[in-house]
Image: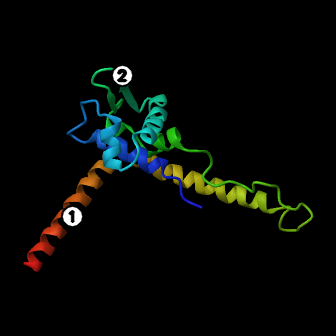
Amino acid sequence: MSANSRLTLATHALTLMASPRYRDNFITSERIANSVNTNPVILRGLLGLLEKQHLVSVQRGSNAGWKLARNPEEITLLDVYHAVKPGSLFAMHHTPPNPECNIGCGIGSALEDVYANIQHTLEQELAGTTIADILRGTYAATAERRQQTCKEQLINQ
């Protein structure tokens, strides 16, 4: 079972659009796909979901592309999550468990409470993080990685 990466891909795209190089310009899905290293068709589907939630604007025709519809400080990861989530974080059984089993008859109720608490905690955390926060964190991680690379090159000389 693989994890759903839609939140990550959408956050990556929004963070790229929030960067100073692209902040005030429309950026093509091909350019975004190049950064994400995925197919532009996949990104256009996600960007369409973000547009429906008024997180991005699209321009068609000449100079076609996408850009943020709001300031990066105003877009939380919860906004992004709500735009692209496939449904609940956790799903119950695809087929009902055996109602004659002591565990099967009650596990759904027990898990629903746990899952609701997890969902609430997740949403609180996402609400406290903006695209601007992710952009700052990205730049900090990039600077740290470049500094480490420079140190390694000096050592290897």
- Relative to the observer, which residue lies in front, 60 or 93? 60
**In this view, 98 is above or below 29:** below
Residue at x-position 50% and y-position 44%: 81
The answer to whether 87 is drawn above or below residue 144 in the figure is above
Q: Write down the quadrant of residue 110 in the picture.
A: bottom right
Residue 115 spot, x, y in % from top left: 65, 56
Q: Residues within 10 Å of mark 1 (few under 14, many from 20)?
A: few
Quadrant of the rendering where the N terminus is positioned:
bottom right
Residue type at numbered disc 2: Arg
The colour scheme used to paint the residues is rainbow
Per the rendering, the mark at residue 104 is: none
Quick one: 78 or 84, which is closer to the camera?
84
Based on the displayed image, in which of its 4 quarters is residue 137 positioned?
bottom left
Q: Position of residue 15 (x, y in %)?
A: 32, 44
Left or right of 128 on screen, residue 117:
right
Q: Judge whether residue 156 can be spotted in this image.
A: yes
Task: First in sequence, mark 2 or 1: give its number.
Answer: 2
* Quarter of the C terminus within the rendering: bottom left
Q: Quadrant of residue 24?
A: top left
Q: Residue at 36% of width from left, 41% of height from top?
A: 14
Residue 88 location in percent, x, y?
62, 48
Say which residue appears at 47% left-offset and 48% top-offset. Answer: 7
Residue 53 vertical position relative to residue 89 in the rendered view, above or below: above
x, y percentage for residue 76? 41, 42
What residue does disc 2 label? Answer: 60
Residue 144, disc: 1
Badge 1 amino acid:
Glu
Secondary structure found at label 2: loop
Q: Secondary structure at mark 1?
A: helix
Mark toward the viewer: 2 or 1: 2
Left or right placement of residue 2 versus residue 69 in this view: right
Q: CA distance from mark 2 to mark 1?
A: 38 Å
